[in-house]
């Protein structure tokens, strides 16, 4: 009976340790576009030492390819980001920026994701709470 109970508990670990959400960001790119675009995303309550991620989809629209120069994240070691975006994203194509939240303590966290393009930036204010 004990082995069944342990197996039952272990089957739920992935649900709590690695949750996913989806978000869409659509960016217009042309030679006349300059400036920053601001977004907000809150990961909500997350168990300490477990991880959540969200996929931000970047879409190249307009009349020129989207030129990605840099991907930066600020706010401490609880945030991380990865991308499959090429340096030059053709018009009509999409790529993903996966952003992770991994709280180490029971408290409120904030961070910022910077996606830097040739003619501007997308800045995503991040929030979450460790429970």
Image (spheres, helix red, strand yellow):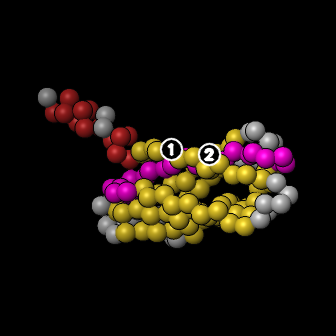
Dominant SS of magenta comes to strand
Q: Quarter of the image containing the C terminus?
A: bottom left
The residue singled out by tag 2 in the image is: 57
Residue 94, by quadrant, is top right
Residue 93, by quadrant, is top right
In this view, 9 is above or below 85? above
Residue 45 can be seen in this image = yes
Kind of element beneath mark 1:
strand
User: Is residue 130 or residue 1 the one in the foreground?
Assistant: 130
In this view, 23 is above or below 117? above
Residue at coordinates 37% horizontally, 57% vertically from top-left? 44
Residue 12, by quadrant, is top left
Q: Which residues are magenta?
A: 44-65
User: Is residue 42 or residue 107 the one in the foreground?
Assistant: 42
Residue at coordinates 73% horizontally, 52% vertically from top-left? 28
The residue singled out by tag 1 in the image is: 22
**Residue 69 in magenta?**
no
């Amino acid at each position: 009976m004990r082995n069944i109970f342990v197996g039952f508990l272990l089957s739920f670990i992935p649900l709590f340790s690695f949750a996913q959400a989806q978000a869409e960001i659509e960016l217009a790119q042309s030679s006349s576009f300059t400036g920053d675009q601001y977004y907000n995303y809150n990961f909500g309550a997350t168990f300490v030492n477990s991880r959540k991620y969200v996929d931000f989809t970047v879409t190249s629209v307009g009349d020129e390819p989207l030129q990605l120069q840099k991907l930066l994240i600020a706010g401490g070691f609880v945030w991380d980001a990865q991308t499959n975006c090429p340096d030059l994203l053709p018009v009509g194509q999409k790529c993903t920026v996966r952003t992770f939240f991994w709280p180490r303590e029971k408290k409120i966290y904030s961070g910022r994701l910077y996606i830097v393009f040739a003619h501007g930036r997308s800045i995503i204010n991040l929030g979450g709470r460790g429970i």
